[in-house]
Amino acid sequence: MSSDIRRISSGGAYEDVLGYSRAVQLPNGLVLVSGCTGADGGPYDQTVKAFGVAFKALEQAGLGPEHVVRTRLYLTHARDVEEVGRAHSEFFDKIRPASTMIIVNGFVDPGMVVEVEVEAFGPVAGGSA
């Protein structure tokens, strides 16, 4: 039931313009975090910033990086795999979620070179928002 689904906002401008939530928490404890980006710096820096955005959304759901069960990383260039992978490994080396890297044509902001999605599973925090 939709009343049992908690929608989490980060306050980002695109959320209202495009009609989406930063994250959605399902009654079973699954949290789906929308694509997160960081437009400044190189591939490593953008990946670190993007995961920071994702982790803030998970925190609102009462979860942390240790609850992450899947990541998806979208890159605009195959040459960035090592730098993006290094950032990913710094967060998830011990956690080892299922993960996929996909090369894409581009993003809304041409300065962005990476976007990450996160899925986490854990105890349900609080009631509906």
Image (tube, grey):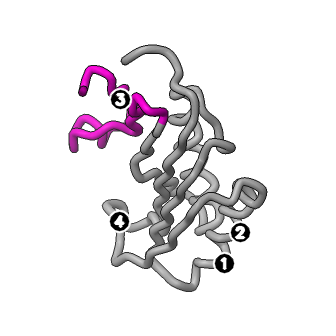
Q: Which residue is rendered at x = 57% and y = 62% of the image? A: 98
Residue 11 on the magenta span: yes
Would you place residue 101 above or below residue 109 in this image? below
Helix, strand or loop for disc 4: loop
Give left or right: position of 19 versus 32.
Answer: left
> Residue 74: horizontal and vertical position, in percent?
45, 68
Say what amino acid the circle numbered 4 marks.
Answer: Phe
Give left or right: position of 82 versus 123.
Answer: right
How far apart in space, not on screen, are marks 4 and 3 (Cα)?
A: 24 Å
Q: Quadrant of the N terminus?
A: top left
Q: Nearer the viewer, mark 1 or mark 4?
A: 1
Q: Which residue is rendered at x = 68% and y = 43% of the image? A: 66
How far apart in space, not on screen, are marks 1 and 4 (Cα)?
A: 20 Å
* Crowding at mark 1 (Cα within 10 Å: few <14, some 14-19, many 20+): few
Q: Nearer the viewer, mark 2 or mark 4?
A: 2
Q: Give the labeled residue for mark 3.
A: 7
* Crowding at mark 4 (Cα within 10 Å: few <14, some 14-19, many 20+): some
Q: Earlier in the sequence, mark 1 or mark 3?
A: 3
Could you tell me how many numbered marks the image carries?
A: 4
Question: What range of the chain is rendered magenta?
Answer: 1-29
Would you place residue 36 above or below residue 83 in this image? above
Q: Which residue is rendered at x = 60% and y = 67% of the image? A: 42
Residue 15 on the magenta span: yes
> Which label number is shown at residue 82?
1
Q: Give the labeled residue for mark 4.
A: 107
Q: Nearer the viewer, mark 1 or mark 3?
A: 3
Q: Nearer the viewer, residue 8 or 48?
A: 8
- Residue 48, by quadrant, is bottom right
Say what amino acid the circle numbered 1 marks.
Answer: Glu
Helix, strand or loop for disc 2: helix
Q: Which residue is rendered at x = 52% and y = 54% of the image? A: 38
